[in-house]
Amino acid sequence: MAKIRGAIIIDRDRCKGCNLCVVACPLNLLALAEKEVNKKGYRFAQQTIENVCNGCASCAIVCPDGCITVYKKKEI
Amino acid sequence: MTDNEIIQPENLVYSKPKLLNDNPMHYCPGCSHGVVHKLVAEVIEEMGMEEKCVAISPVGCAVFAYNYIDVDWVEAAHGRAPALATAIKRLWPERLVFTYQGDGDLACIGTAETIHALNRGEHIAIIFINNAIYGMTGGQMAPTTLMGMKTATCPYGREADIHGYPLNITQIASTLEGTSYVTRQSVHSVAAIRKAKKAIRKAFENSLRGEGSSLVEIVSTCNAGWKMSPEKANQWMEENMFKSYPVGDLKDTTNLE
Ligand SMILES: Cc1ncc(C[n+]2csc(CCOP(=O)(O)OP(=O)(O)O)c2C)c(N)n1
Ligand code: SF4
Ligand code: SF4
Ligand code: SF4
Ligand SMILES: [Mg+2]
């Protein structure tokens, strides 16, 4: 059966660390950086669990600053 | 399949709308204004109205909206956006003309302009960000502040005897003959954001058809003014704001999808 695979790119310097994408991801794949900040001084969002994103775009849709780009492809 | 194979232009499913430029927005982390800016930009782009749109920004946190969405803007004096929109739309009827206003701007100092523009049935759309507080100036009470809600100017909570009652201006708008589309939405979840986007699209289409005024209230958070995390502010909004400001259409005579 064809499986849908997703991948995201987070613009870490645009991110304000609001955590809304972290809460929105149904698979809990995101977290704010623990010990690092971006050039604005925010703990930026990052993907902490790899290879299971389904490309649902929930994280990107809720991001108030438009920091997340989402791609999706059918695995054959 | 590697991420690099997935991250290809043909597989793109979501990105920041192009019309929302790369200037960092000055809004606090997690502010609803950002989400609504994205929706407005997406809708204008999808309608192909980038070059045929005049937006009016308010006084309030959204005062600099013109720095972020690349259409033509006019910055109105506090509360006067619907008056400017009236003039622009009458002189330039084929333009998409909309205002973007907070609750202090629209429902306090600009109440007269709001009500009269809507009652005249001006063919404009109004996007109304109701976060129940004056965000920009440090979190003072607004006419829309909920009963019991604490702000900088009602630190013990809003009381009817001293402060009067929350003003439900969207409900008032729905009783005016000039309005044809009046709706209340929110942007706290993926589902809500999708509905809010449809509502903005409908309001913009309606203003182009010239069949009366549209008002889209977005029940919003001001996590800085409410002194909560963005996530907590969304929860607080669901639990408290929706009781006084329930989401849904209040009026729709447009026959649009
Ligand atoms: C004539 C005038 N009166 C008062 C002010 C101060 N002032 C600036 S923004 C604002 C209210 C903003 O609240 P709102 O419209 O709810 O926008 P928000 O920041 O919450 O998005 C006030 C009272 C002003 N700039 N001009
Ligand atoms: S696209 Fe969906 S699954 Fe992937 S990180 Fe974002 S919210 Fe999670
Ligand atoms: S929602 Fe956007 S701004 Fe907020 S933490 Fe996630 S990427 Fe950063
Ligand atoms: S003060 Fe409130 S409304 Fe203004 S940017 Fe901050 S969170 Fe948003
Ligand atoms: Mg406000």
Image: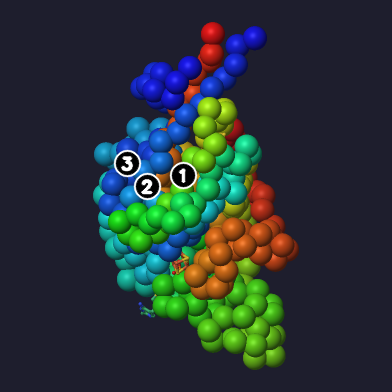
Judging by the rendered image, the residue that carries numbered circle 2 is: A12
User: Where is residue A3 drawn, in percent x and y?
Assistant: 60, 16
Judging by the rendered image, the residue that carries numbered circle 1 is: A46
Q: Which of these two is toward me, A63 or B173?
A: A63
Q: Circle 3 sits in a helix, a strand or a loop, which is it? A: loop
Q: Callout 2: residue from which chain?
A: A
Q: Which of these two is toward me, B54 or B90?
A: B54
Judging by the rendered image, the residue that carries numbered circle 3 is: B19
Q: Assess mark 1: CB under 8 A from ligand 3?
A: no
Amino acid type of disc 3?
Leu
User: Where is residue B69 drawn, in percent x and y?
Assistant: 32, 48
The residue at the point 28 percent across, 47 percent down is B22
- Tags 2 and 1 in contact by the CB under 8 Å rule? yes
Q: Nearer the viewer, mark 3 or mark 2?
A: 2
Q: Residue B240 occupies which quadrant of the picture?
A: bottom right
Q: For the residues marked 2 and 1, what is the alpha-carbon distance in whole angstroms?
A: 8 Å
The residue at the point 49 percent across, 40 percent down is A47
Q: Callout 3: residue from which chain?
A: B
The residue at the point 49 percent across, 23 percent down is A72
Q: Circle 1 sits in a helix, a strand or a loop, which is it? A: strand
Which comes sooner in the sequence, label 2 or label 1? 2
